[in-house]
Amino acid sequence: MRVINGSRAYQAETSKALQLSVLRELGLPYPPARVINDPADAPAAADGLEFPVVVKPNIGGSGAGIVRFDTPEQLAAAAATGGLELGPDQTALVQQFITSEEGRITRVEVLGGQYLYGIRVYSSGETFNLCPADVCQTTEGAELVRSACPVDAPRNGLRVEGYEPPRQVVRDVERIAEACGIEVGGVEYAIDDRDGRLYYYDINALSNFVADAPRVVGFDPFARLVDFLDQERGAR
């Protein structure tokens, strides 16, 4: 049976610690992080990291469970009072938070393991849910198709624009997809406002295409996905 995004892709999707291992093996930059299995270990894990930091459950999605701490004292207090949730596998990352330029992240989608499109998502900084299907405005403020995104998405303060990433980024993303066995998915990165460096920070194998894609990126990725699936079915 032909399986799209098989077990390797699923494993990568459901383990942020594994994602960092993949990025390290590929020699690609990612925000400094330590893995913990006990909330009490969070303050020590943050030692040497530049604040703010985030505690990020190993298994999550749409920003679920991610908490930002601006000072070591805030983190220590949360660890001491049960304010940290590590998620279902009791594993989490203590990770340096990227203060991105203009509150902007870039997401690069692949189909068949090859570059499909890129978008820039601009956030108010008050949410970790940067799912592109939740974006309801272009950068010019035009509202996107409502059927493609939740009613409450404008409250997230998200804006989106199509973006053609540099060729090196495209090559990096395709290498990440290959290493994770991802045929349909996306990789997110940000440029740190403090040092101007690029950091990859999230790998997605359960991808949601951007809302109102024809307006944002100039074509319908769902149509291309259907063509890809039909092609793979015919190749059996």
Image (cartoon, rainbow, N blue to C red):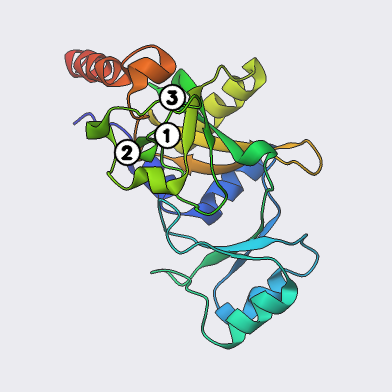
Left or right, residue 101 beside residue 171? right
**Earlier residue among tags 1 and 3:** 3
For label 1, the residue is 181
Left or right, residue 117 beside residue 209? right
Name the image quarter holding residue 223. Answer: top left
Please identify the residue farthest to the front as the structure is shown: 141
Looking at the image, which residue is at 46% across and 72% down?
90
Percent of width and height locating residue 189: 60, 37
Left or right, residue 223 beside residue 169? left
Vertical comparison of 134 with 47: above or below: above
Dot 1 and dot 3 residues touching (CB under 8 Å): no
Vertical comparison of 107 with 127: above or below: above
Neighbour tally class for label 2: few under 14, some 14-19, many 20 plus, Cα within 10 Å? some
Q: CA distance from mark 3 to mark 2?
A: 15 Å
Q: CA distance from mark 1 to mark 3?
A: 12 Å
Percent of width and height locating residue 190: 63, 38
Looking at the image, which residue is at 56% across and 78% down?
39
